[in-house]
């Protein structure tokens, strides 16, 4: 649980910092479509920073390989999906464009693992 809480909190911090940089530091420096791309990276970064808190909660209730896989898949998605969009937004270069869908697949794997882990939890009541 501590690992996922720590990674989630640090990831949330960086999502906010990068969001502020995108809003204030990129204005008038890159074209609007690159800012939009950067903001999409920030949005998905924050969604999955919060998802890491769900991973931490599940890890505290029922640690399992599914929960750990979900956490690492979310981390991989943040790095690959959001990271490639940050790169594109900052540089305009499409050199990493093939990495973006891999990050999206990592996000989906994470959500499916959370789903499966949730099914394994005992029913309340």
Image (cartoon, rainbow, N blue to C red):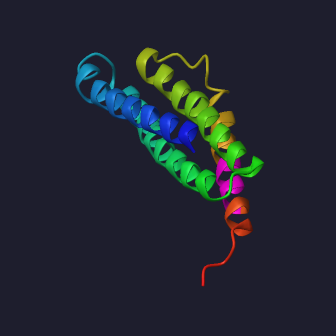
Residue 99 within the magenta-colored segment of the rendering = no
Count the marks: how many? 0
Using residue 6 as the reference point, say whether residue 109 is left or right of it. right
63 shown above or below 89: below
Image coords of residue 87 (percent x, y): 49, 20
Q: In the orientation shown, which residue stands out farthest toward the bottom?
A: 125
Q: Name the residue located 33 percent from the left edge and 23 percent from the top edge.
A: 31
Asked if residue 114 is among those painted magenta in the image, a careful observer would answer yes
Q: Which residues are magenta?
A: 108-115
Q: Eyeballing the image, is 69 above or below 121?
A: above
**Location of the N terminus (image quadrant):** top right
Q: Left or right? Give the position of 8 relative to 80.
A: left
Residue at 72% across / 43% down in the picture? 69
Above/below status of 85 relative to 61: above
Q: Residue at x 46, y 18 (%)?
A: 92
Classified by dominant secondary structure, the portion drawn in magenta counts as helix
In the depicted view, which residue is nearer to us: 64 or 76? 64
Q: Residue furthest right?
A: 65
Q: Is residue 32 visible?
A: no
The one of 84 and 78 positioned closer to us in this rendering: 78
Q: Quadrant of residue 46?
A: top left
Looking at the image, residue 29 lies above or below residue 70: above
* Residue 110 in view, yes or no: yes
Question: Which quarter of the image is occupied by the C terminus?
Answer: bottom right
Residue 28 image offset from top left, x and y in percent: 23, 19
Image coordinates of residue 4 in percent, x first then y, are 56, 40
């Amino acid at each position: 649980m501590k690992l996922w809480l720590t990674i989630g909190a640090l990831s949330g911090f960086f999502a906010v910092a990068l969001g502020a940089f995108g809003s204030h530091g990129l204005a008038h420096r890159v074209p609007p479509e690159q800012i939009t791309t950067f903001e999409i990276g920030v949005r998905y970064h924050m969604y999955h920073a919060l998802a890491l808190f769900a991973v931490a909660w599940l890890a505290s209730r029922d640690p399992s390989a599914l929960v750990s896989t979900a956490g690492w898949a979310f981390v991989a998605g943040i790095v690959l999906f959001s990271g490639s969009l940050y790169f594109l937004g900052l540089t305009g270069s499409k050199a990493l464009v093939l990495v973006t869908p891999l990050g999206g697949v990592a996000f989906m794997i994470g959500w499916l693992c959370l789903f499966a882990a949730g099914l394994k939890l005992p029913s309340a009541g």
